[in-house]
Structure formats: structure tokens, C-alpha cells
Image (cartoon, helix red, strand yellow):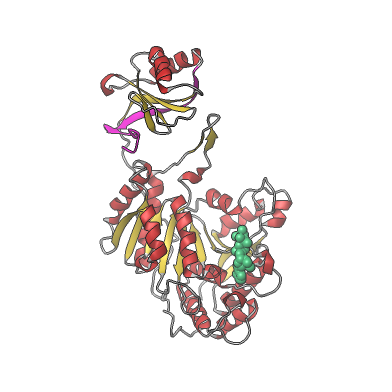
């Protein structure tokens, strides 16, 4: 018998304690070799003044055990409370959100009985960096950041997950027909890394058609990998399609720590009644057991759980014509799973983790992102963003042409990405936010001092400069969009 693995456990708020107790009961009966360390998180911690709902001592436990089984929590009403999940995810670098979405027809009603897919969502980047600014009276901005190491980590994780789980296909979804640089990078990295996994079928879909196909034919998907925002939306659509949101687990994986939880909330409406379904948390614990290298226990529990469901042992919210007897309470349901330990489902498909290597790698991925040589970077111009209300593009251009300091010259002005000078259309709707592009002659390099001289001249004449973006080439390749979706 190997040593007990320390894990951090939070019983949470609302139905959290009930479903955690039921889950731990099953884990113990199945012989999971774990040593839970309990921490307090959630509503009481928020109200005690911890703005993220977690105490400093809880962080110590998480750093020590590096494995977190978490019940849902309640965030108190009112402002000033930060999301606990976002805080944990960012602080501990949990870069991958993994959500298996499986149908359990006919025991759980769904229009898509054959659905069995996994969404692997990038968890740290994209529009979620929280870098937002109000720039003018009319314009607000959110920065979308996509990095090469971030793409490499998540895409490789998705392929490793597919390989380790015997999954046959990985689908990448982006909007790179519009966001050619950011989503384009994600897609390019996907193509690069796919070549290391020749046995796995790959495809790329534009997110809009991909989401539509997911909603209508989810059975055609296997593993889906996406940037953060698309993955956030897709994973909720996919879970909803299975009809079993209350049963769905998710894992948040980092190089150092991993967190496992049900996707549902703390359900205060049924808290304390002993009727909540512990299945989402129990299946999260199954993911955790595979993660900590106890796949045989995970398989035993998962198959017993499938058998329990198909035997008609259902909690209240699943109760229907295929259910036996009265609705089972949380603990009775746990006991029913325990009675079936060692049995396999006969109608639903059994799972197999027994011989598989760890489903979610604990150690860093097999090939860390490669160190790439730094590109030769050349500064060739600057986009100056200007706040100007009640002016025409031609008027603004006249001012800027007159103020430009050689070698920089005004090349174009766009408004919300639409070129309005030279050669704009009077029909174009303009806000008070202008992107004014200055470049050197014939694309030749300029200096930071040239930009400063330009800005000084503009500001001295009362131009309200909001911000600038340098225009650079990298190894001779343009590092900026030409505008208008080019
Ligand atoms: P949150 O904002 O925390 O996600 P919510 O109220 O939007 O909270 P849930 O807490 O997931 O979402 O609850 C949504 C509904 O699903 C509620 O009616 C709740 O009773 C039910 N529900 C959620 N989890 C369970 C469960 N494990 N067992 C039974 N019913 C559940």
C-alpha cells in the first residue's frame, strides 16, 4: 500500500458540505489513498474581510499539497468581493480548464445521447487579463493578450490529454479570419504542435461555425481546444447540451497545483436539506484521483457511479420514469455508489483508467515550450490614438500633417478600425477616438526619439494623445495589422 497523498479540501457553502461529505465517504470506501487537509473558504471568509474569500493559511495548505478538491462557495451580495476562482486560477497559474461533457441517456434527458467530449480551455490569457481603460467620452477598451508560451502550453496539454485518454481527434476553434495576429498565433501554434501527434486527427474551425456545430452535432467532437473567452462560452453550452450540468466536473490544471470541482454553484435554495446530488463533485474527485496517480480507484468509483445511475438510483433533480423508489438523498446516493463498488455499468459505457498513465500530467508536459531565438526587431512607425470630439477626419488630418516631425509622416487615420483618411467616406460613423498612423519614409526604421519628438509637437498644440502603439517588424515580418481586417 503506497503512502497517503495529502490533498486540500474545502467544504464550501450552501450544499457544499453535504456533497463533500458524501464524496469523501465514497472515496474512503473505495480505498482512495488520500489525507485531506481541510481549509475554510467562501462566504464567511469574505465577510471576515478577506477580499478573495480565502485566508493566508489556506494558501499555505494549497502550496503544500498542490491538489485541491473544492466544493462550491457563495460570494456574498454587494460589491468589493473578488472571485475566488479567478484569484486561485491566476495566483497558482492554473492554465488549463478541462471540462468533460458526457451524455447519460436515457437516464438523463438530452437531445444528444451520443455526446462525449472534453473542452480544454486556456485559462490565463485573452480578454481575461482585466486590462481595460476608458479612453474617451465614447470609447472603452479591453486588451486581448495572447502569448506564444501560453498557446504552446494549452495546445500541448490538449494533445497530451487526447493521447493519454485514447481520444482520436482534437479540434481547435478560433476567430483568426478576423483576429489574424492574436487568434492567428493560437491557430499557428496548434498546427505546429499537431505535427508531433500524427496519430491524432486534427481540425480547425472558425469559432462561430464551430459553436453552431457543437450545438447541433456535439457527437462529432472529441477534444476541443480554444482560447479563454470562446472556451468559457463553449464549455457552458456543451455542459448544458448533455442535460447533466448538475453532474459535470471540471479540473483546473497548472504546472504546480491542480483544482477539481463540480461546475454547479452552491445552490442555497436546497442547502441543508440533504437532497443535493453529489455527482459533480464525486466525478471531480475521480479526475483528481487520476491526477494523483490512483487511476484504479478512480475507475472503480466511476464505473460504480455509472452503474448506480443506470440502476435508477437518482437524487431528486434527476428523478423520473427510469428512477427506482423515492428520490435518494445525498448520503443514501453515496451509499448506493459504495454498494456498487466493483460493478460495471451494463448500458452506459464503462470507463477505463486502469492501465492508463496519469490522465492529467502532474509533472511538466513532456516538452516544455522551446526557447526561441529573439527576433530582429525594427521600429518602423507609431499609431497615435487621439481623443478628438466634433471634428472631421479631414480636419484632424490637416492638423496632424502640419504637426508631424520628420522622418515621421501621417500615413492614415482610422476610426474604430475603418479608414477615414485619406479617401474616407462621408457615410462612415465616427466616434471621438482616432487611430493616427505615422511611419518613416519607405518603411525605413525610426527611433524612439522620433516618436517622442512627434508626441511633444502634438501635445504642445493641444492634441489629446490617449496612447501609442509602436509599429515593429520582427525578422522583417510585419508585427501589426494593416487595419480593416487585412
Ligand atoms: P452560482 O451563481 O453559484 O452558479 P446559481 O444559483 O446560478 O449559483 P447553482 O447554484 O448551480 O446556480 O444552482 C442552479 C440550480 O440548480 C438551483 O435550482 C439548484 O438547486 C440546482 N442545483 C445545483 N446544483 C445541484 C446539485 N448538486 N443537486 C441538485 N440540484 C442542484
x and y, in percent, of residue 44 in the image: 72, 56
Asked if 43 appears above or below 79 in the picture, the reply is below
Q: Is residue 453 left or right of residue 37?
A: left
- Which quadrant contains ligand 1? bottom right
Residue 412 visible at all: yes
> Residue drawn at (48%, 85%), measured in percent from left and top?
343
Residue 4 visible at all: no
Is residue 464 covered in magenta?
A: yes
Which quarter of the image is occupied by the C terminus? top left
From this viewpoint, which residue is outermost toward the right? Answer: 48
Which residues are drawn in magenta?
Answer: 463-486
> Residue drawn at (61%, 82%), measured in percent from left and top?
335
x and y, in percent, of residue 462 in the image: 51, 15
> Residue drawn at (40%, 58%), measured in percent from left and top?
211
Nearer to the camera, 453 or 461: 461
Q: Is residue 192 left or right of residue 302?
A: left
Nearer to the camera, 160 or 115: 115
Amino acid at each position: 500500500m503506497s503512502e497517503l497523498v495529502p490533498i486540500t479540501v474545502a467544504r464550501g457553502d450552501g450544499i457544499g458540505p453535504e456533497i463533500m461529505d458524501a464524496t469523501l465517504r465514497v472515496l474512503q470506501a473505495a480505498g482512495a489513498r488520500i489525507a485531506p487537509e481541510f481549509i475554510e473558504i467562501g462566504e464567511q471568509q469574505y465577510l471576515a474581510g478577506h477580499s478573495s474569500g480565502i485566508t493566508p493559511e489556506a494558501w499555505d495548505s494549497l502550496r503544500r499539497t498542490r491538489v485541491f478538491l473544492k466544493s462550491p462557495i457563495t460570494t456574498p451580495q454587494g460589491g468589493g468581493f473578488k472571485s475566488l476562482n479567478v484569484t486561485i486560477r491566476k495566483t497558482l497559474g492554473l492554465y488549463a480548464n478541462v471540462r468533460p461533457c458526457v451524455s447519460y441517456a436515457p437516464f438523463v434527458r438530452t437531445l444528444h445521447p451520443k455526446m462525449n467530449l472534453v473542452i480544454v480551455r486556456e485559462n490565463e490569457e485573452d480578454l481575461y487579463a482585466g486590462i481595460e481603460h476608458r479612453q474617451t467620452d465614447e470609447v472603452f477598451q479591453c486588451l486581448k493578450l495572447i502569448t506564444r508560451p501560453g498557446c504552446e502550453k494549452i495546445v500541448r496539454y490538449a494533445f497530451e490529454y487526447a493521447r493519454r485518454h485514447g481520444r482520436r481527434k482534437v479540434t481547435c476553434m478560433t476567430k483568426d479570419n478576423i483576429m489574424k495576429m492574436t487568434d492567428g498565433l493560437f491557430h499557428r501554434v496548434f498546427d505546429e504542435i499537431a505535427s508531433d501527434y500524427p496519430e491524432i486527427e486534427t481540425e480547425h474551425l472558425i469559432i462561430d461555425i464551430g459553436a453552431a456545430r457543437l450545438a447541433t452535432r456535439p457527437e462529432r467532437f472529441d477534444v476541443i481546444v480554444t482560447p479563454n473567452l470562446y472556451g468559457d462560452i463553449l464549455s457552458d453550452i456543451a455542459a448544458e447540451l448533455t442535460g447533466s450540468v448538475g453532474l459535470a466536473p471540471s479540473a483546473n490544471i497548472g504546472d504546480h497545483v491542480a483544482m477539481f470541482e463540480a461546475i454547479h454553484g452552491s445552490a442555497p435554495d436546497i442547502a441543508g436539506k440533504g437532497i443535493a446530488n453529489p455527482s459533480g463533485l464525486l466525478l471531480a474527485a475521480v479526475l483528481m484521483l487520476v491526477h494523483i496517480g490512483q487511476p484504479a480507484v478512480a475507475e472503480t468509483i466511476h464505473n460504480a457511479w455509472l452503474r448506480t445511475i443506470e440502476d435508477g438510483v437518482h437524487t431528486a433533480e434527476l428523478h423520473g420514469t427510469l428512477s427506482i423508489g423515492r428520490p435518494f438523498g445525498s448520503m443514501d446516493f453515496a451509499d448506493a455508489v459504495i454498494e456498487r463498488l466493483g460493478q460495471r455499468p451494463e448500458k452506459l459505457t464503462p470507463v477505463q483508467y486502469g492501465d492508463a498513465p496519469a490522465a492529467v500530467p502532474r509533472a511538466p508536459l513532456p516538452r516544455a515550450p522551446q526557447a526561441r531565438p529573439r527576433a530582429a526587431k525594427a521600429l518602423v512607425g507609431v499609431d497615435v490614438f487621439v481623443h478628438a470630439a466634433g471634428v472631421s477626419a479631414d480636419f484632424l488630418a490637416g492638423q496632424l500633417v502640419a504637426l508631424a516631425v520628420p522622418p515621421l509622416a501621417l500615413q492614415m487615420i482610422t476610426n474604430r478600425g475603418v479608414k477615414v483618411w485619406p479617401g474616407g467616406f462621408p457615410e462612415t460613423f465616427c466616434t471621438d477616438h482616432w487611430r493616427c498612423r505615422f511611419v518613416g519614409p519607405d518603411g525605413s526604421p525610426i527611433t524612439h526619439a522620433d516618436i517622442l519628438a512627434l508626441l511633444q509637437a502634438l501635445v504642445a498644440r493641444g492634441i489629446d494623445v490617449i496612447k501609442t502603439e509602436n509599429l515593429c517588424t520582427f525578422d522583417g515580418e510585419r508585427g501589426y495589422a494593416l487595419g480593416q481586417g487585412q
